[in-house]
Image (cartoon, rainbow, N blue to C red):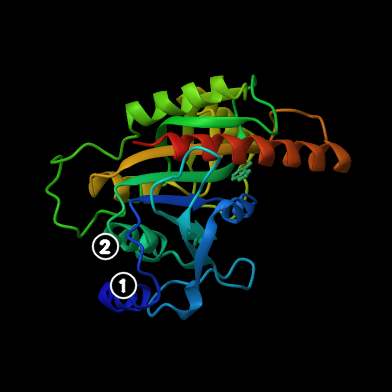
Amino acid sequence: MLNDSIKYIRSKVTSQPTVGIVLGSGLGDFGEQVVDPVIINTRDVPNYPVSTVHGHSGKLIFGTIRDDKRCSAQLLVFQGRVHFYESNSLERVIYPIDVANALGVTTLLITNAAGGINRLFQPGDLMLIRDYINLTYENPLIGRGIRAGERMAGCFHEGLLKDALTAAKELHIPVQEGVYCWTKGPTYETASEIRMMQRLGADAVGMSTVPEVMTAAHFGMKVLGISCITNMATGITGQRLSHDEVTETANMAKAHFTSLVREIVLGLR
Ligand code: HPA
């Protein structure tokens, strides 16, 4: 099944990506950073799960990112992802990670939009994910030949996190660090659920990323996670943002996100 997808992709692309980038909701524009891209529509890839959320499929973008002095490793950028709430199938959610692994990806940058739980956060903040809480208790690795307790749950790579912090400092981009809590969705949380998550130690909440991180870590990939705090979670502030403020925040976050991810990718060894 995966073989058919890989065969198709290899028939269209000759580059051998080593770095994968999963772009979260609202962060898809980052794909435009790729120079001389080879783009594949996921709907054309045999067996590739197609997102139902926006009524259109995602894209796989192959190429590199460059500045005047540096050129990145060969990249595979995933524009658009499938969420668990679309189908109740984790196999579909982690399919892109299976593809990345089969194509030779060894480093994964995974991004998402998340609600801020930590009261020190503000919409527009970027949060480097230090750890996660899997509040769904779903596990994508069931059936993949792991004996109970044989492995730790998926972890983020210490070195990559450090590199990301250094890159942010150099660029004067303020970043937060924190714990991401995965919920199934599709509904947002109640105020009481958010209070519970806060007590459990979560800094942000969202409906993605954790199954992909678990799978990538299982494959031995080095994983970095970045959340874009698009809103404060239910009940955290009574305040409503005006539309202008939201647009402004989103645009600022996007500019910071693009600069930071570019710098991280260009600095990867
Ligand atoms: N909750 C869950 N998922 C989200 C949120 C939120 O507040 N914001 C963006 N994704």
Secondary element under disc 2, as helix, strand or loop, is: helix
Number of numbered callouts drawn = 2
Q: Is residue 40 above or below residue 192?
A: below
- The residue at label 1 has a CB less than 8 Å from ligand 1: no
Q: Are marks 2 and 1 in contact (CB under 8 Å)?
A: yes
Q: Residue at x 39, y 70 (%)?
A: 13
Q: In what element is the residue under mark 1?
A: helix
For the C terminus, give its image quadrant. top left
Circle 1: residue type: Ile
Chain-order first, disc 2 or disc 1: 1
Front-most of 195 and 60? 60
* Residue positioned most to the front: 69
Relative to residue 48, is residue 105 depicted above or below? Answer: above
Ligand 1 location (quadrant): top right
Above/below status of 174 relative to 19: above
Determine crowd level at label 2: few under 14, some 14-19, many 20+ residues with C-alpha closer than 10 A: some
Task: Tell me if the residue at label 2 has its CB under 8 Å from ligand 1.
Answer: no
Mark 2: which amino acid?
Answer: Ala
Instruction: Please provide percent x and percent y for residue 54.
Output: 64, 67
What whole-number distance in Å separates the C-alpha atoms at marks 2 and 1? 7 Å
Residue at 50%, 37% (x, y): give it. 69
- In the figure, is residue 160 to the left or right of 104? right
Which quadrant of the figure has residue 32?
Answer: bottom right
Residue 98 located left or right of residue 179: left
- Side of 237 where 25 appears, left or right: left
Q: Residues within 10 Å of mark 1 (few under 14, many from 20)?
A: many
How far across and down, in percent of the image, does residue 58 sit? 54, 67
* Residue 248 visible, this orientation: yes
Residue bearing mark 1: 6
Residue 231 in view of the camera? no
Q: Which mark is residue 102?
A: 2
